[in-house]
Image (tube, rainbow, N blue to C red):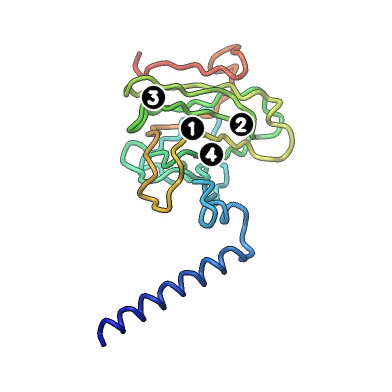
């Protein structure tokens, strides 16, 4: 009798899961929600981000400055520590409310790779490629990428995307996703004030403290 009750409970549970899957397939949800939870084609579930930042001032990704970091972090980061936070999975996005009339900008990312240091990360600004982070070794480094003013046209905020090249296939378990890059800080500054003239789409890298 006890065994029959157990089988019945398992059957009800299975029917419940099928019902939920059927509802999810037909549910009127956002494309981002469907891609993240249902189809699992994305690791990016957008969170509210005002995009507020101060040009030229580094935004540390540590716990003490979490409010400033959360203002620009849209998705793809988790487990904030005392001195930074991890890019969690193959994609992370950051939003910046750039003032109207801004010229060329420089996006600087400071950090170190995760478990697979040889894995390339492609960067784009509002969907246009701006460079490649091809980090060799495990040392912490600073990488700068030019954001041409042509990508800032219109009222849309600037959105910087980090995308791991050829990422592993997404799994159902969140725990299966990898800590791909440890972010120490982000900076968006006026290009001419920081580096002088640089070529579009080129990453300028320098070792921290070097």
Q: Tell me which label, 1 or 4, sits earlier in the chain.
A: 4
Q: Are marks 2 and 3 in contact (CB under 8 Å)?
A: no
State the residue in front, 156 or 65: 156
State the residue in front, 137 or 39: 39
Distance from disc 4 to disc 3, alpha carbons, whole Å, reads 23 Å
Write the residue at 49% across / 39% down: 91
In this image, 106 relative to 84: left or right?
right
In this image, 108 relative to 34: left or right?
left
Distance from disc 1 to disc 3, alpha carbons, whole Å, reads 12 Å
Return the mark for residue 118: 3
Q: Position of residue 87 (x, y in %)?
A: 42, 38
Q: Which residue is mark 2?
A: 125
Q: Tell me which label, 4 or 3, sits earlier in the chain.
A: 4
In this image, 183 relative to 103: left or right?
left
Return the mark for residue 166: 1
State the residue in front, 145 or 123: 123
């Amino acid at each position: 009798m006890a065994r029959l009750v157990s089988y019945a409970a398992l059957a009800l549970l299975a029917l419940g899961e099928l019902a939920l899957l059927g509802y999810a397939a037909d549910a009127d949800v956002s494309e981002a929600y469907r891609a993240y939870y249902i189809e699992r084609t994305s690791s990016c579930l957008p969170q509210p981000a005002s995009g507020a930042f101060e040009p030229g001032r580094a935004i540390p990704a540590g716990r003490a400055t979490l409010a400033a970091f959360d203002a620009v972090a849209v998705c793809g980061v988790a487990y904030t520590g005392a001195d930074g936070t991890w890019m969690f999975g193959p994609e992370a996005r950051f939003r910046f409310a750039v003032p109207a009339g801004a010229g060329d900008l420089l996006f600087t990312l400071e950090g170190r790779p995760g478990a697979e240091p040889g894995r390339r990360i492609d960067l784009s600004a509002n969907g246009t490629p701006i460079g490649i982070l091809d980090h060799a070794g495990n040392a912490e480094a600073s990488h700068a990428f030019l954001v041409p003013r042509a990508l800032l046209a219109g009222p849309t905020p600037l959105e910087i995307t980090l995308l791991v090249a050829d990422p592993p296939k997404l799994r159902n378990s969140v725990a299966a996703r990898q800590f791909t890059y440890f972010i120490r800080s982000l900076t968006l500054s006026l290009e001419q004030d920081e580096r002088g003239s640089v070529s579009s789409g080129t990453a300028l890298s320098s070792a921290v403290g070097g």
